[in-house]
Image (tube, rainbow, N blue to C red):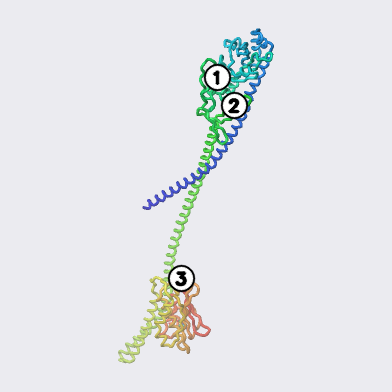
Amino acid sequence: MEQQGKRSWLARFGQSLVRRRLIVSAVYLLLAAAVILPAQSLLRDSLMFEQQQLINERLALYERTIYGELQRYRTIPYLVAQSELVQDLLRYRTAVLQANRYLEEAVRDSEADVIYIMDANGTTLASSNWRAPDSFIGGNFSFRAYFRDAKAGREGGQFAVGTTSRVPGYYISRPIELGGVVAGVAVVKISLTGIERSWQTHDESVLVADHAGLVVMASRDNWRYRWLPGTGAGVVPPALEIPGAHVDEPPELPLTISSRRGYEIAEIDGERFLSGRNRIEPLEWELTYLLPMAPINQRLDTSLLIMIAAAVMLYLLIALLHERRETLRSRREAADAAELRAVNTQLQTEIEERRRAEQELRAAEAELVQATKMAALGQISASVAHEINQPLAAMRTNLASARLLITRGSQEELADVMQQVDSLVHRMSVMTRELKTFARKSDERAEPFDLRDSVSNALLLLRGELAGADVQVDTALPETPLEALGEQVRLEQVTVNLIRNAIDAMESAEERVLRIRVQEEGAHAVLTVEDSGSGISGDPRQLFEPFFTTKGSGSGMGLGLAIAERIVTAMGGSINAQNLPSGGARFTVTLPRRTS
Ligand code: ADP
């Protein structure tokens, strides 16, 4: 039952411990989340900001690169158009070979892709790639916008994929005027693949769309020649046109751009990028730079993991420290409890020892009282023997006288002698009775008793004697019980003795007043008996010696006060006698007061 109670208490304690831990853990979790989440958000913001800066820098750089690259070649068609050789070619259709060589030379010098001259109908007359099998010579490109622009007297510029070579490039054209008429067109084709290759080498994600929305340059091949979403889907752009041949309409690039917290997030084929866009204004092209989100997310994930790991480690550390403190505390508590138990045991042993010692002391005390009594008895035995010898000797004499009187037949005298013997026997019986009382070992247990009762009982016993001796009794008793420990009858005996002595002492006095007072004095209960008698003659201490008496033979044994003193001493108190200034004697009995 108790075992069960203990177990359920343990279970409850365990449960409350688990509950407390759960609450503490939950609070810690909330605190950790309150720190980690804003930190993560801050880190994300700073990373995004940093990456956006990078995007802006790259956009500016590539805008300059592309535009600069095209700008570099802009003057070539102009210069070519000014050449005498080229003008002669258009004018007379002669010196084709020289013109080809001239253009070939120009390409080598400028690193342009191809430079060629068309007549006013768009047919190529001379070209730098005159030696190649897919040379432009003889080809007619009048359908190209750049030709039409130049024919109209303007500078032309267009991105297109070559109809013969299938090599993409940017074409810049200039009219060649002879006598105020456009007699031909000079064209330079610039390859942009070098820039694209450099993007690929550096693992950059870039795409460039022309004015119509067609992706003309891209770092990834599968992005190129696709329409940007919402531009020319379902149409073949002029850039890809090949006269007389079927060209599939380019599909739309699966690109979506959404804005999140002020940043542009692009998604292509499930891949996400942080993106930025810039217009290359003179060309009306749009440059898009894409920065994959994966590394950013990876960095964020790593930092989140690190923070979570740090939080877990901190939690474990705190838990470990807490556990250690708990262990130390419970160890200390156990030690304290053990110490307390030890002190308790020691205290119990001491109490036990004390009780035993007390018992022994009480026994020794009882023995001592008895021994004292016996010693006193021994002391008085001699007196008793002496006292008894006298009446015994008297009785022997009386008996001898009686025997003589019997033989003489003197009846009257015999009666006198017998009367004397009787008084002697009486005297001896009184003596033995008193001695018996004195020698009796008290086996009654000390009990609390009211002093007032002892006094009242004693007065009741002596009512007749007091009235007979014409004594005026003045009693002062407390209103509440005043208790002492001992035998009430014994104190009654003492009181009776004191009152009797007082009556005796006042026998020849004119005024007979007996004053009895019971009062509390600190830790003591005090009984005083005063009389208006003759007073004490001699040393008051003497009165308490056995067989001291001033009373005439037969009336006093001199044992009363001796016995009274021993009774009072046995109760732990004291008795003394003194004379009153007004005459008379006062006997004071002092007993330890019993307090409850
Ligand atoms: P007893 O009364 O047999 O003489 P006690 O021991 O009682 O023996 O008294 C001893 C003596 O003390 C008495 O003989 C008496 O001289 C003296 N005494 C006792 N009480 C008084 C008293 N109240 N006034 C004067 N003397 C007294």
Q: Is residue 474 above or below residue 338?
A: below
Q: Picture coordinates of residue 214 (x, y %)? A: 56, 24
Under circle 1, the secondary element is: helix
Could you say where residue 566 lies in the image, as x and y percent from the top left?
A: 44, 75
Of labels 1 and 2, earlier in sequence is 1
Residue in the picture at 60% in, 11% down: 137
In the image, the residue with mark 1 has its CB under 8 Å from the nearest atom of ligand 1: no
What residue is pinned by disc 2?
287
Q: In this figure, what is the number of numbered marks? A: 3
For the residue marked with disc 3, what is the amino acid? Thr
Instruction: Check whether the beta carbons of the residues at disc 3 and disc 2 lie within 8 A of each other.
Output: no
The span from disc 1 to disc 2 (Cα, nearest Å) is: 20 Å
Between circles 3 and 2, the one closer to the viewer is 2
Crowdedness near tag 2: few (<14), some (14–19) or many (≥20) residues, C-alpha within 10 Å: many
Whether residue 73 is visible = no
Which image quarter: residue 74? top right
Examine the image and state in which quarter residue 424 appears: bottom left
Element assignment for label 2: strand
Q: Nearer the viewer, residue 388 or 100?
A: 100
Looking at the image, the residue that sits furthest to the front is 180
* Nearest to the observer: residue 319 or residue 256: 256
Q: Which residue is mark 1?
A: 240
- Distance from label 3 to label 2 (Cα)? 112 Å
Q: Quadrant of ligand 1?
A: bottom left
For mark 3, does the 10 Å Cα neighbourhood hold few (<14), some (14 to 19), or many (20 or more) residues? few
Element class at badge 3: loop
**The disc label shown at residue 595, or none:** 3
